[in-house]
Image: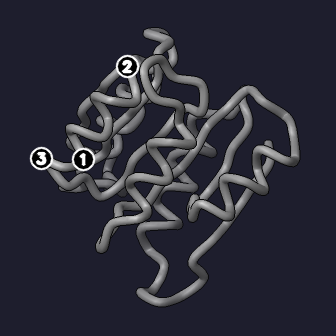
Amino acid sequence: MSNPRLESKRVLIVDDDEDILGSIDLVMRAEGAETTTVTDGNAAVSFIHSTRPDVVVLDMMLPKRSGFLVLEKIKSEPDAPVIVMITANQGKRHMAYAKTLGVDAYLTKPVSLQRLVDTVVELLDRPPGGDQERAAAG
């Protein structure tokens, strides 16, 4: 890849499915990101407190603490990272709830890895104070 779009960006990937975790990790690294992976909500919150990532790719259904509770905790703090929630849940109520908690993007599985990367790049490139929410189904 000639011009990695996520060079020097720190990305935390939170999913309890090892295959999904590995795939997202691989594509983010290919774009130049420094990645960390965790498999439960409590580990995600601990990591975010100790090491501020630029982006969190967050599954909704997680052991120990749901993605919603992680999202709520992260977004209640100043200088919260960009949060992209991914879920297999097609329900509009879940998307609406995630938006009220401050999610930056909401993508439903299966989501192409290219679309996920494009969404992350787009969110990181937006001007400060610009459109604060983007919810995308699909």
Residue 123, placed above or below residue 89: below
Identify the residue under disc 3.
50
Q: CA distance from mark 2 to mark 3?
A: 17 Å
Quadrant containing the C terminus in the rendered view: top right
Of label 1 and label 2, which has the lower sequence position? 2
Q: CA distance from mark 1 to mark 3?
A: 6 Å
Circles 1 and 3, Cβ within 8 Å, touching? The answer is: yes
Of label 2 and label 3, which has the lower sequence position? 2
Measuring from the top left, give residue 105's x and y in whole percent: 62, 56
The residue that appears at 78% across and 30% down in the rendered structure is 89
Classify residue 21 by image quadrant.
top left
Residue 93, placed above or below residue 131: above
- Judge the density around disc 1: few (<14), some (14-19), many (≥20) Cα neighbours within 10 Å: some
Classify residue 104 by image quadrant.
bottom right
Residue 91, placed above or below residue 124: above
Q: Which mark is residue 48?
A: 1
Quadrant containing the N terminus in the rendered view: top left
